[in-house]
Amino acid sequence: MLTLDEMLSRSLLTPEQHAEIGAWTRQARTPEAIMAMPEPLWRALSLASMLMNVDADLQQPPCFEHAEP
């Protein structure tokens, strides 16, 4: 939900899209249910994700730092 809130604060989603996507993801019980989001909402979410470069974190190598005891 924080990512959706950031998309809204950056004006990448309208308040209506933010509310509708939030409602959809809260009621979806499975990844498949989320993927069944209506096309206009899915497009808005995809575009906002691309503009925020959300996938960049997935392309970074993992950080394996560990704290000293």
Image: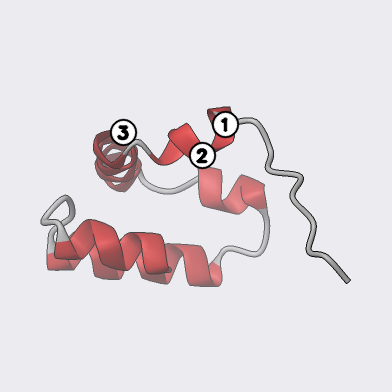
Alpha-carbon distance for marks 2 and 3?
Answer: 12 Å
Q: Of the numbered discs in the image, which one, if any, rests on residue 4?
A: none
Q: Secondary structure at mark 2?
A: helix
Alpha-carbon distance for marks 1 and 3?
Answer: 16 Å
Q: Nearer the viewer, mark 2 or mark 3?
A: 2
Residue indicated by mark 3: 50
Residue 29 sits in which quadrant? bottom right
Residue indicated by mark 1: 60
Tell me which residue sits at (41%, 41%) in the image. 54
**Quarter in which the N terminus is drawn:** bottom left
Question: Upstream in the sequence, badge 2 or badge 3?
Answer: 3
Q: Of the numbered discs in the image, which one, if any, rests on residue 57?
A: 2
Left or right of 25? Residue 3 is: left
Tell me which residue sits at (50%, 45%) in the image. 36
**Quarter in which the C terminus is drawn:** bottom right
Three-letter residue code for mark 1: Gln
Work out whether 9 lies above or below 58: below
Alpha-carbon distance for marks 2 and 1?
Answer: 5 Å
Q: Are marks 2 and 3 in contact (CB under 8 Å)?
A: no
Residue lying farthest to the front in this orientation = 68
Three-letter residue code for mark 3: Met
Q: Are marks 2 and 1 in contact (CB under 8 Å)?
A: yes
